[in-house]
Amino acid sequence: MTQPLSKFQSFRVFMGKVGALAMPYFNSDQKWKARALLAAIVVLNLAAVYMLVLLNEWNRVFYDALQNKDQVVFWRELGRFTYLAFGFIIIAVYRFYLTQLLEMRWRAWMTANYLDRWLANKAFYHLELARFAKGEDAPPDNPDQRIAEDMNLFTSYSVSLSMGLLNAVVTLVSFVGILWSLSGSFAFSFNGDEFVIPGFMVWMAVLYCLLGSIATHYIGRPQIALNFKQQRFEADFRHHLVRVREYSESIALDNGEPVERRQLGGRFGEVLANYLKLIQAQKRLIWFTNGFGQAAVVFPFVVAAPRFFSGAIQLGELMQISSAFGRVQDSLSWFVDNYSSLAAWRATTDRITSFEASFQALQEAETQMPTGAADSLQIDQLDLALPGGAALLGAHGLRLKAGDTLLIKGPSGSGKSTLFRALAGIWPWAKGRVQRPVDFDTRVMFLPQRPYFPTGSLRNALAYPEADDRYTEAELQQALRDALLPQLTGRLNDEDTWGQKLSGGEQQRLAIARALLKKPRWLFVDEATSALDEAAEKAVYERLLALVQSQNGALVSIAHRPAVAAFHQTHWTLQPGAAGGSPHQVLAA
């Protein structure tokens, strides 16, 4: 059984996570700019503390002048304050500006880095498959939020809290000596013995803040888990709203509004319920921290009052003691004042760390299916499994050469589409050996049943994923006409959400127009004409067949309609496999 980590070990693990996420940026190709900005911010923080030390000394001289009614010193110190205040303002402005600049550049680098990794090697697709296999609660949930929001929060908290801690430490070191020299000693008797505590005010400040920090930790600790859950519930609610928008027509046709309202209400209920717990936890912490802060205002006066009334110190020294105590107390209370931010920082760090771990786990679990160059597509031995690990399909000794037209058929759920995914190289649960033609990766195209179209102009949707300027206006219009979409030839510059604007049949014909435009040699069609009527299906298949013949290529289709079979010379049939093997086997006919 794993032993729970101690508080110190937990802190070390957390700081290790922060370091692992932060160091890549400061060691990246932008490292010199990043380090220079960080160094400048550190220098400005040190300069700000130095200005506070000068202002603390100014307090003593100014209030002594008031007590002594010394007008010359009073007006001189007012003039000196102007210069000190102006210097402090300049430091504060540029400290803010450079801090924000570092946060922005760091966020930009992290976002670009994770976008590259998320979109590289089909990781975004494989991560969703892994979530499907392990359930909706499996990490990483809502990768869009990790990239869009958590990167921003992590960089902001990392810079602000680390610089705040540095400022607190330097302020403490700078003012503790001042407070020690001003606070005098405290003498008392115990059992007839005399005891003297030097630097009494310093020890009182340490004791006051130590007790406050311990109390803050135990009062505010529930916020860490609540912040983590809040970010997740917010993302889940937003994700479901987006899905309702994307599938608005299907939901409307099914009269599914009451169901969606209940589901959205349930997800928002989770947001509110957790947020209520969070604000209750914050309320308890605010009760304490505000009381702690208010007591700190009068605490130094109460402790130093006997020396002032006895004449041992003047008003200026009393104000300087109060100012120095306040600085020391603020430094020692940094943990108290920033506990809510620390809790949010830890939750954000844990979310990004789990996102990072998912990439590493994906890389370790990914199986590379060896391929070899050939003049034809040859499946020597291929075994496919479901995301959960259960065997799905076996294919052995199959060949597809240029000039072939192949129809793959079988019962629903037998693995036809998964076979396409494996041949495309995007299915991670595939083992065996497949030899692909030399030009397969550059001249292959897959037409799914439900194609994707980016939001934007129609010409972009038609040319996707290539740039639309690669094709002439005439080529784009001809592709639309050949795909039976003449009504769209005049709308190439129109911008819209084409995945929602067009009907199912129009979307499939637009995807077919892509194929006619790009002229692939190896064309795989997965129920890509299921929404077309028989006449339209016959017309587009005639054009697709003519296309691959002109390119000396091959056409592979998955379809259930008997009419599609007429366009294919060869059939592969998925049938139940032998006991102890894959549930289905591919048989060539």
Image: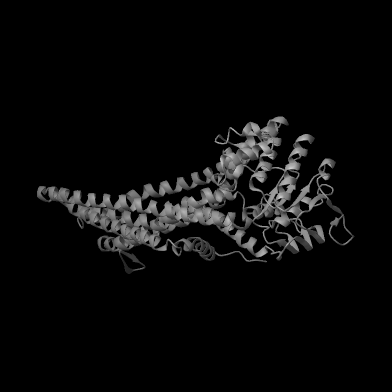
Residue farthest front in this picture: 550
Number of marks: 0
Q: What quarter of the picture does the C terminus occupy?
A: bottom right
Residue farthest bottom in this picture: 193
Image spot of residue 344 (x, y percent): 50, 51
Residue plotted at (67% across, 63% down)? 365
Left-right relation of 16 to 200: right
Q: What quarter of the picture does the N terminus occupy?
A: bottom right
Residue plotted at (47% across, 56% down)? 109
Image spot of residue 51 (x, y percent): 26, 56
Above or below, comparing residue 365 to residue 535 in the picture: below
Left-right relation of 172 to 395: left
Image spot of residue 171 (x, y percent): 32, 59
Image spot of residue 528 (x, y percent): 73, 43
Q: How is the image coloured?
A: one colour
* Rendered image quadrant of residue 210: bottom left
- Residue 194 visible in this rendered orientation of the protein: yes
Q: Nearer the viewer, residue 492 or 151?
A: 492
Residue plotted at (54% across, 64% down)? 13
Residue farthest right in this picture: 579
